[in-house]
Image (cartoon, helix red, strand yellow):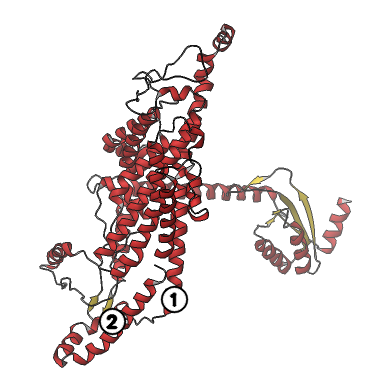
Amino acid sequence: MLLVKPILVKINHDKAQKEGYIELKEIEPETHKEEKTEQPYLEEEFDVLKKKKKKFDMAEVFVHQTIDTIEYVLGVLSNTASYLRLWALSLAHAELSKVFFEMTMGIFLFSDSNVNFLLVNCR
Amino acid sequence: MGADVEKALEARRLSFTYLAGLIGRDAAFSFERLLFRRTRGNVVTVMNDIEETIESINKFSVEKCLFIVIFRESERVKKSVISVCRAFGTEAYDVSGDIMKEEDDLRVQVRDLKSLYNETKAQIEARLDELVKFNKELKASPLAIYSWLFEKEKTLFRHLNMFYTDKNWLRTLCWCPLDKKAEVDKVIDLLTSGKKAQCSNLQEVRSHQLTPPTHFQTNEFLRSFQDIVFTYGVPSYKEADPTLFTSISFPFLFGIMFGDLAHGLVLLSFSIYMCLRKEYLIKSKSVLASVLEYRYLFLMMGVFSSFCGFLYNDFAAVPMNFVSSCYDVATDNSAELARSDKSCVYPYSFDPVWYASTNELVFLNSFKMKFSVIVGVSQMILGVVLKGINAVYFKSPIDFHCEFVPQLILLVGFFGYMNLMIVIKWLTDWEGNEQEAPSIITLLIGIPLNGSDPGPVPLYGSGTLQKYVGRFILGTCFVIL
């Protein structure tokens, strides 16, 4: 991912550029004219359709890939650990219900003496 | 003194003018000073604070002073005093003559003004009532019709602004799903038939480098889950949409966290009520109206919470005892309970005896942590596989071989191996040497740091297999990156 992808991207880009030059030479005048008259007015009117040329920078691809790799590795580790929140929340829920039960019904059910019973009920 | 002054005044034909009025207490000082300067010291001002606060029309209570300006009779001075008073926003009243008449005049003026005010107010209210009144023929109040009209005009002009004007024609670009193109053309024909307006059908722009916006086809059920997916990121054009998987996995993870049958059933019944009584709730404009959008989300969450509550054997912190426990629940509270039958396995969920035991938390924590991590790693593998499917669909071998494959190998190799170790540990019988059972965390950390040294009791097989598997995984991870 880190090393192989930039090399492959560069090879692809070179191939595309070479093929681009060949295409212009090989095209016949008629079909070329047809391509042009199909929608030239649209490109002049709407800026958003104009074709933009992108500069290819090898260093940029490398940096991009490094960041991607580091991001993925750290992401895998941290996201896997973050699944422990499933445990944490279920623990919190269970403990809260247990304490609630003990405080409300528990006093009633688990007390040993009769005095306690009287105290709770005849207030 | 009075008679002498009067006689002197008579003799010299002097007369004084007295102008009175009210001024606010904060402006009083500057008012006095300005009067003095303007009239070149020819006036005398007497100020007297008024005790009670006066309420103005605007319901502000102001503290005012009463002032009297005395000067020798002169039109010029009177004019400048009155203009200064006006500048400060008060009126000066001539009290040199008959005060009672002035007072009567003022009272009449106040009464007239009050009645004018009330009349105007009543007129305005009547007009407003007229606007809001429901008109049976038009089925709406005039106000509603106006606001609808303005809304329509505003929308029309907002959309017209998006067009590119060129003499008589308006042109624009728009996105349209391919399968809806015929429908749009039909509507255009319908609208322009028989009218003077001309509108062309949609013409496709073939060559462009723009990415189309993504069109999501959702139904009532998936819409809540779609919103959840959007908070993480909107899938771009033609990418795999994880919403369908989310509709099950999100409520399931919620259920694992909730894990209580009693509360789960409450949630379930609440959501069933919302799903069945949707129209009634909308009509009666209840408080629940805003939650109605997510009723299917609540329904799924209720189902899965009840299910997980059933699995955790937890009904509001009370375990359910449908099937008798596998342990001898002795009445003498012994420290360690014995099993009635060695091969007894509780048919579903946790044995209720756990909730009465002292090592309940140790066991449950360990189980829940391992279970969460298993579920988590599976979901992450699903995510990475979706990415691989994207790479296959867009026919990009670079993405497939250089991103998907290494990512999958890393994930499965490291954390998948961890899951495997967890399952192996669960399936082995540690009877006898419970103290020496290897900790998963120790083993995992041992892979990069320790050469995956298996420790006193190996997890599976003999120690050597474990060592080699660990080292192989470490090497692969390094190479694959």
Q: Which mark is residue A60?
A: 1
Q: Which mark is residue A45?
A: 2
Q: Position of residue B213 (x, y in %)?
A: 29, 65
Q: How crowded is mark 2: few (under 14 residues within 10 Å), some or many (20 or more)?
A: some
Secondary structure under badge 1?
Answer: helix
Q: Nearer the viewer, mark 1 or mark 2?
A: 1
Indicate whether B250 appears above or below A50. above
In-image side of B222 versus A88 (left or right) = left
**Residue type marked 1:** Glu
Q: Are marks 1 and 2 on the same chain?
A: yes
Q: Position of residue B99 (x, y in %)?
A: 69, 50
Label 1 chain ID: A
**Residue type marked 2:** Glu
Q: Is residue B367 visible?
A: yes
Label 2 chain ID: A
Indicate whether B422 appears above or below B193. above
Secondary structure under badge 2?
Answer: helix
**Number of dots carrying numbers:** 2
The residue at the far left in this view is B194
Q: Nearer the viewer, residue B245 or B194?
A: B245
Q: Position of residue B329 (x, y in %)?
A: 44, 16
Indicate whether B206 appears above or below B442. below
Q: Please name the residue shown 66% across and 46% down the image.
A: B54
Q: Is residue B239 visible?
A: no
Q: How crowded is mark 1: few (under 14 residues within 10 Å), some or many (20 or more)?
A: few
Q: In which quarter of the image is the C terminus of chain B?
A: bottom left
- Give how far apart the Cα atoms at labels 1 and 2 are: 33 Å
Q: Please name the residue shown 37% across and 71% down the image.
A: A5
Q: Quadrant of residue A103?
A: top right
Pointer 1 and pointer 2: residues touching (CB < 8 Å)?
A: no
In-image side of A99 versus B106 (left or right) = left
